[in-house]
Each structure stands twice: as structure tokens, then as C-alpha cells.
Image (cartoon, grey):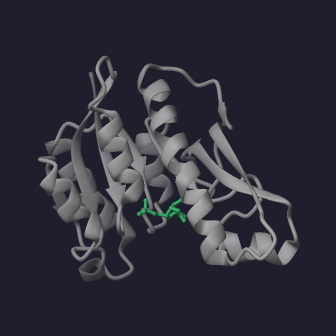
Amino acid sequence: MKQVAILISGGGSNMIRLLESMEQPGHPARPCLVLSNDPAAGGLVRAAARGVAVATVDHRPFGRDRAAFEAEMQHVLEAHGAEILCLAGFMRILTPGFVARWQGRMINIHPSLLPKYRGLHTHARVLEAGDGEHGCTVHEVTPELDDGPILGQGRVPVEPGDTPESLAARVLEMEHRLYPAVLRRYAAGEREPVTFP
Ligand code: GAR
């Protein structure tokens, strides 16, 4: 049984879907920790209500010292026995040192069809470009931002009259299908990409 830590910065809707999925019979992983860099992240309360261990390592007291912030995170992750890290709306850039330490054991969900639209504001950028489709990607984390081997992608159409908000909501629904499916396979050692629909 792989021990999974989920890293969040916000509401944690993906995190909740991952927690729910790990309750399924025969799942090869279980949650050991939900960790946030923001003590106000709504997802912390939601995880604790489900009986999952939660912790915060606030990045702000560390200022620009990312390595010190990450050393504290590493300490907490080790204390909880984490073996796989799932980034789920975790909005801090990680240093190459931290990434190297977890490489092959850390995955992320990004709201675009990578390699298109790395970084922020993906939904608005898709609309500006006039793309006919959009989606989300789960990938292994490597030192380059929003890069690394793709483990799964979910596609959604862009509809006439879409706003960044309506598009984000459609993509988020797809994220909620994709991420649990990928985690289940990943925890079982499966690296072949899955695609939705
Ligand atoms: C999700 O859309 C996720 O793909 C995105 O943040 C949102 C978090 O929502 N992640 C990134 O943009 C990472 N760069 P959630 O807290 O409800 O899961």
C-alpha cells in the first residue's frame, strides 16, 4: 500500500476526489497527509473532516529561501511516511533539489493539454487563441515547470460563448475524473498514459 501525500494551496476539490478514490476497495494507495503552504487553504478543513492528517508549512516566514521552506516540507512529509506526492493546485514553484529528491514519485495536475499553455491563466489563453478544445494533464514532475512525462490527459470542447470561468468549470470536472484514474495506475507502477473521454 503506497502512502500518498497531497499538496494543496486552495480549495482542494481535486484533493477530495483523490481521497475519495483511495477509499475504493483494492486501491493500491492510501492518503497519509494533506499538506498546504497556506494555513487558510479551504482544503485543509475538508481533509481533516474526512479524518485525514493535515499539516501546514507556511511559505511566507521563509521569504525567498525556498530551500529552507522545502526542507521543512520534507521533514513533515517524512514524518508521515509519504511515498508518493500528488500536487493538486499547489501553487509554489519547487526547486530542482526538491524535485530531484521526489523524481519518479511526484505527479501534478495542470489545467491545459500540455505541452500547450504551461503556467498560469490557461483558460483565458485558450479563449484568446480561439482553440476548439482544451483540457487537463497529469504528468510526472521534473525540474522544468509543467513539463515531464505525461501520464494522462482529458479533453473538453470549447463552447461558443465560453468565459474563462465556464471553461475552467468544464475542465475541473474532467480533472476530477482524470486525476484519480491516473493516481490509481501510478501507485500500481503503471506509466502508460490514459486519455479521456
Ligand atoms: C486546478 O484547476 C488545477 O489544475 C490547478 O489549480 C486548480 C486547483 O483546484 N493547478 C494549477 O494551475 C497548477 N499550476 P482545486 O484546489 O479545486 O483542486
Residue 13, horizontal then vertical, whole percent: 39, 58
Looking at the image, residue 19 lies above or below residue 173: above
Question: Measuring 75% from the left and 53% from the top, which residue is drawn there?
Answer: 115
135 with respect to 182 (left or right): right
Residue 11, horizontal then vertical, whole percent: 35, 67
The answer to whether residue 120 is visible is no
Looking at the image, residue 137 lies above or below residue 4: below
Quadrant of the frame with the C terminus: top right
Quadrant of the frame with the N terminus: top left
Residue 101, horizontal then vertical, whole percent: 41, 43
The answer to whether residue 173 is visible is yes
Question: For residue 129, what is the image quadrant?
Answer: bottom right
Question: Measuring 45% from the left and 34% from the top, which residue is drawn there?
Answer: 183
130 with respect to 116 (left or right): right
Looking at the image, residue 31 lies above or below residue 71: above
Pick whichever, 176 or 146, lies toward us.
176
Pick whichever, 180 or 70, lies toward us.
180
Residue 169, horizontal then vertical, whole percent: 56, 65
Question: Measuring 64% from the left and 44% from the top, which residue is drawn there?
Answer: 148
Q: Count numbered badges in the picture.
A: 0
Looking at this view, name the residue that lies furthest to the front: 160
33 with respect to 22 (left or right): left
81 with respect to 22 (left or right): left
